[in-house]
Image: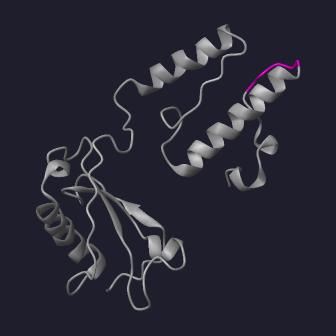
Amino acid sequence: MAHPLDGLGYLSTRAAGKVISGVQFPSTMFAGRAPEGHVALAAYVGGSRAPEAARLPARELADLVLAELRPILGLAGVPSVVRVRHWERGLPQYRLGHDARHAAISAAQERLPGLFLTGNYLAGVSVTACLVQAARTAIDADCYLAGGTAVAAPAEAMPRILRRR
């Protein structure tokens, strides 16, 4: 493999990725995800970019993904293990108008004290974005229940690991 896999993975642009929207490098992120001398890759296919690709039979989909990964990562040979999982509704994808919907949700929360909404549909689908959103919501709910005013939790109130750098 030519690529050092020295990150967590990558997101693909429409120009670069025909069917792959992103790839993670699990064996870089977590020890023990692949045997010595091997790597583990997780490719994400489908979504709004290639919805038809996500419905392909497993072998055909695996071949498409490998063909796309070979020049990008410098893959050689054949994989030891290939697993294909089909999730009809994988990652949420924001559509045009998401900012307006988010603003409406925020306005509803301001009009209705004690209403707290959180989730990966609000401010990002990454695990970190979800954790940050959940922590802010928990801090706001705690403040509200203690008799205070729930406002967006400041960065210094966040658990250290969730603070944006």
Colouring mode (rainbow / by chain / secondary structure / one colour) = one colour
In magenta segment, residue 106: no
Report the predominant secondary structure element of the magenta stretch.
Answer: loop
Which residue is rendered at x = 16% and y = 48% of the image?
A: 55
Which residues are drawn in magenta? Answer: 147-151
Q: Determine the residue located farthest toward the right in the rendered image.
A: 147
Q: Determine the residue located farthest toward the bottom in the rendered image.
A: 37
Q: Within the image, what quadrant is residue 110 found in?
A: top right
Q: Within the image, what quadrant is residue 98 found in?
A: top left
On the image, the x and y values in percent for residue 116 come to: 65, 22
Is residue 153 rendered to the left or right of residue 133?
A: right
On the image, the x and y values in percent for residue 119 come to: 54, 34
Which residue is rendered at x = 26% and y = 72% of the image?
A: 82
Is residue 28 rendered to the left or right of residue 49?
A: right
Quadrant location, the C terminus: bottom right
On the image, the x and y values in percent for residue 33 come to: 46, 76
Which residue is rendered at x = 38% and y = 75% of the image?
A: 40
Quadrant location, the N terminus: bottom left
Is residue 68 rendered to the left or right of residue 8?
A: left
Total marks in image: 0
